[in-house]
Image: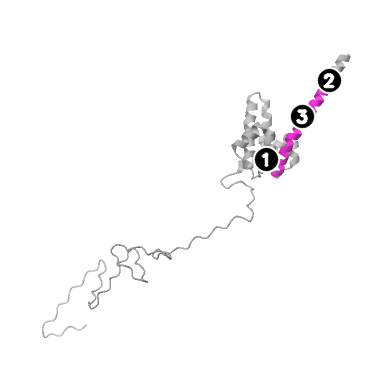
C-alpha cells in the first residue's frame, strides 16, 4: 500500500512539473505573438487565448474567419493533419508578407516559429496591412507617407516645332526650299516655298498658277485703226 501511494505521489509531482513547464513555454511563445499583435493594431491579450489567437491572426492577414474551423482538421487521421499544415503555412506566409517579408521569412516562421515571432515584434518590421487582400493598389489600410504623396509635376509646354530651342542652331532647309532669311519662319510642311526675290533690275515674273487652274487664252491685239474694246 505504501508503495502504491509513493508511486501515485511521484506521478502527481511529474504531472505538476510537466504542467508548469508547458505553461512557461506557452507564455514564452505567446509573448512574441502578443508584441506582433500590438504592432498590427490588434488586441495583445488575444495572443494568450487558444483558438482566439488564431482567429486574430486570420483577421490580421486578411483571411476569412471561418478558416478557424481548420483547427479541427487534425481529428481526421493523416490527411487532416496534412491539410491543416498546408493551411497553417499559407497563413504564416501571409503574416510574413503583411510585415514586408518574403518566402525566406516564411520558412523561418515554419521551422523556428517562436524566434521569428520575436523578430517580428522586436525587429524593424512594420505592419503594412493584410497581405491576403493586397492587390495592384497596394496594401489596404496602409497609411500614406509622411507629408502626403508628392504632387505630380506639370508637363513641359509644347514648343514650336519650327523654331529650335535657345542656343541650338536651326535645322538645314528641306530640299527645294530657299535658305531661311534671318527673322523669317520656315514654311509649314506641305506649303509651297516663297519665290526668291528677283535680282536688281529684273522685272518680277508672274506668280505661279495654283494647281488645277486652266490658263486663260491670250488676247489677240486689235487690227490697225480699230479702237480697243472698252473694259
Task: Return the residue at label 3.
Answer: 22
Please tell me whether mark 2 sits on a helix, a strand or a loop. Answer: helix
* Left or right relative to 153: residue 131: right
Q: How many marks?
A: 3
Relative height, residue 65 to residue 75 (above, below):
below
Quadrant assignment, res 203: bottom left
Which one is in front, 46 or 210? 46
Task: Tell me, for residue 49, which label it has, or none.
Answer: none
* Left or right relative to 188: residue 201: left
Please identify the residue farthest to the left as the structure is shown: 224
| Mark toward the start of the polypeptide (3 vs 1) | 3
Within-10-Å neighbours for mark 2: few <14, some 14–19, many 20+ = few
**Start and end of the magenta stretch?**
13-40
Residue 67 visible here: yes
x 78%, y 29%: residue: 21
Picture coordinates of residue 34, whole percent (x, y): 73, 39
Picture coordinates of residue 27, whole percent (x, y): 76, 34
| Mark toward the start of the polypeptide (2 vs 1) | 2
Q: Tell me if residue 32 is in the magenta stretch.
A: yes
x 64%, y 30%: residue: 85
Q: CA distance from mark 3 to mark 1?
A: 23 Å
Relative height, residue 22 to residue 96 (above, below):
above
Task: Return the residue at label 2.
Answer: 10
Task: Return the residue at label 1.
Answer: 120
Amino acid at each position: 500500500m505504501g508503495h502504491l501511494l509513493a508511486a501515485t505521489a511521484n506521478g502527481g509531482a511529474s504531472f505538476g512539473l510537466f504542467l508548469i513547464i508547458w505553461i512557461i513555454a506557452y507564455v514564452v511563445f505567446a509573448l512574441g505573438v502578443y508584441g506582433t499583435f500590438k504592432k498590427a493594431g490588434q488586441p495583445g491579450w488575444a495572443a494568450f487565448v487558444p483558438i482566439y489567437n488564431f482567429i486574430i491572426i486570420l483577421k490580421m492577414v486578411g483571411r476569412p474567419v471561418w478558416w478557424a474551423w481548420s483547427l479541427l482538421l487534425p481529428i481526421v487521421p493523416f490527411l487532416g493533419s496534412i491539410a491543416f499544415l498546408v493551411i497553417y503555412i499559407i497563413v504564416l506566409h501571409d503574416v510574413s508578407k503583411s510585415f514586408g517579408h518574403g518566402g525566406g521569412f516564411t520558412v523561418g516562421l515554419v521551422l523556428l516559429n517562436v524566434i521569428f515571432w520575436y523578430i517580428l515584434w522586436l525587429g524593424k518590421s512594420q505592419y503594412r496591412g493584410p497581405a491576403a487582400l493586397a492587390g495592384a493598389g497596394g496594401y489596404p489600410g496602409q497609411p500614406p507617407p509622411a507629408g502626403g504623396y508628392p504632387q505630380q509635376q506639370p508637363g513641359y509646354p509644347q514648343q514650336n516645332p519650327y523654331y529650335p530651342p535657345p542656343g541650338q542652331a536651326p535645322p538645314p532647309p528641306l530640299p527645294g526650299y530657299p535658305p531661311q532669311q534671318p527673322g523669317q519662319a520656315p514654311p509649314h510642311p506641305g506649303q509651297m516655298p516663297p519665290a526668291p526675290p528677283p535680282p536688281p533690275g529684273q522685272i518680277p515674273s508672274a506668280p505661279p498658277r495654283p494647281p488645277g487652274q486652266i490658263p486663260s487664252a491670250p488676247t489677240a491685239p486689235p487690227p490697225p485703226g480699230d479702237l480697243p474694246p472698252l473694259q
